[in-house]
Image: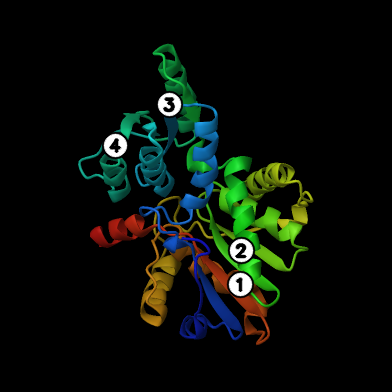
Amino acid sequence: MLPTPLREAPRLAETLGVRGRMLLKRDDLTGFAVAGNKARQLEMLIAAARESRASVLVTGGTPGSNFCQAAAAAAAWAGLRCVLVYAGSPSRISHPNLVAATHWGAEIRWTHDPDRAFVDVAIERAAAELTLDGHVPYTVPRGGATPLGATGFHLAALELAAQLDGPAVVVVATGSGGTQAGLVSGAVALGRDLLIRGASVSRPPDEAARRVLELAGGCARLMGTDIPHAADVVVDDARGPGHARASEEGERAARLALRASGTVLDPVYTAKALGALPRILGERRHDPDLTTVFWHTGGLLDAVAGWETR
């Protein structure tokens, strides 16, 4: 269901103290399962898996990963087996994203190590075991953050430009980095009329920026467009108390979004990014001629999980 809607949000802008025009890019409405923006990168990754004649998709993350449950749904749609490797160990109460992934038919494996960084190693080990058993695995790192996956968001930047009537600042949550990387690659290809600003929700901003720049460069090479420079990648800190933990700033933003625009935001990605938006814009938020786009990446089941714990 592309292009996803671009909605005016005047009351939300007012409550956030943004004087200019504010719009919401509703990538939560891509229309595939509850994948949100993950549908864009999975379109590319699943196509590559099928082209390589893979029989099983192997990826992973944390039990609350939006990407993992979306990957499980996409694999089921494509007729592929799906193996998900999760950090840590099973808990008494399952996150809705984990429940959804199981519902889509994914096989769940656990690292029994809370360190998220170990997941990518475990993904490769799982793929090696599957190969020995006669399967053909297609591996995807945490969050689907690859140059190929980012091409879906390069195309999304072109989609947004066609919906707008001029330059804009685009604010987006940055986790594994693929979404911002693709948007940066696309914005550079368009001549930099779109200024992409990331709100890091999991990694230190410097680390996130390096990762985004590397992915954006790889994406641009695949697309045959100009390579982004370091100055094209701006990432602000929106982590709050840490990865997958709600922040006071984000929770306030989630309440404002619901009441001022009827928009549901998850507490650990999109809400944190919206909460950081006034800081990211700085003094420009007072510019009545500025157009700001907030990129809603989805995360409905994360929102449900947040409600359940409050």
Which of 40 and 128 lies nearest the eye of the viewer? Answer: 40
The picture quadrant where one finds residue 237 is bottom right
Separation of residues labelled 3 and 2 (CA atoms): 32 Å
Res 55 label: 3
SS at mark 1 in the image: helix
The residue wearing badge 2 is 159
Q: Is residue 163 above or below residue 112?
A: below
Quadrant of the rendering where the C terminus is positioned: bottom left
The residue wearing badge 1 is 163
Whichever of labels 3 and 4 marks the residue nearer the N terminus, that label is 3
Separation of residues labelled 2 and 4 (CA atoms): 32 Å
| Relative image position of residue 165 (x, y in whole percent) | 67, 78
| Relative image position of residue 192 (x, y in whole percent) | 75, 64
Whichever of labels 3 and 2 marks the residue nearer the N terminus, that label is 3
Res 257 label: none
Whichever of labels 3 and 1 marks the residue nearer the N terminus, that label is 3
Separation of residues labelled 3 and 1 (CA atoms): 38 Å
Amino acid under disc 1: Gln
Residue at point 43%, 46% (across, down): 67
Which of 91 and 105 lies nearest the eye of the viewer? Answer: 105
Residue at point 47%, 51% (across, down): 39
Separation of residues labelled 2 and 1 (CA atoms): 7 Å
Amino acid under disc 3: Ser
Q: Does residue 195 appear in this view?
A: yes
The residue wearing badge 4 is 105
Separation of residues labelled 3 and 4 (CA atoms): 14 Å
User: What count of labels does the image hold?
Assistant: 4
Q: Residues within 10 Å of mark 1 (few under 14, many from 20)?
A: some
